[in-house]
Image (cartoon, rainbow, N blue to C red):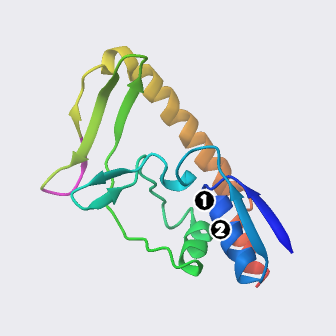
Amino acid sequence: MDIAIIGSGMAGLAAARILKDAGHTITIFEALPGRGMDSHSIEFDGGIIDAPLRVMNPHLWKNTLSLAAHLGIKTFPVRTYMSCSWLFEDRTETWLTTSRSRIGNFPIINNRKGIQQYGWRLVKGMLQLKTAIHQFFKSKNQDSVHDKNR
């Protein structure tokens, strides 16, 4: 069967691979000149940097990471830090960066630029995130439902 896939992002490429493995003829249509998953990637020092970076918590993204393993996409653990930036028409402004302390490995704020101006948005976002996480753990999530059906 001939099948058209629209979009070469994560879902499009995964669907194309699974359908091709099942014996179908696949054509992928993408609006951007490169592949959707790496259309914004940057070549650097003989390698490719994924931009924007895709970081997935292994406890919350079990199905996605299982799909990556099934498709042979390599993943690796990283210690992530936070960086908050605003994109304006003429510039990008990073107003908050974090890292970890050398002793105790506690999260710390490195750059407080703009915290007075944007801090309320960060607090509001964190409260919304806290509520969303609470609702997520109270609900039946996709991974636990999927695991019960095996």
Secondary structure at badge 1 equals: helix
Looking at the rendering, in which quadrant would you find the C terminus?
bottom right
Q: Residue at x 60, y 59 (%)?
A: 10
The reply, left or right, for residue 116 in relation to residue 143 is: left
Is there a contact, CB below 8 Å, between mark 1 and mark 2? yes
* Residue bearing mark 2: 14
Distance (Cα) linking label 1 and label 2: 6 Å
**Which residue reaches farthest right?**
1
- Residue stretch rendered in magenta on the structure: 103-108
**Which residue reaches farthest left?**
102
Q: Residues within 10 Å of mark 2 (few under 14, many from 20)?
A: some
- Look at the image and tell me whether residue 141 can be seen: no
Q: Nearer the viewer, residue 30 or 81?
A: 30
The reply, left or right, for residue 111 in relation to residue 54 is: left
Amino acid type for the residue under numbered disc 2: Ala
Residue 127 position in % (x across, y down): 53, 34
Q: Nearer the viewer, residue 79 or 65?
A: 65
Q: Quadrant of residue 92?
A: top left
Amino acid type for the residue under numbered disc 1: Met
The correct choice, above or below, for 127 with respect to 16 in the image is: above
Q: Which mark is residue 10?
A: 1
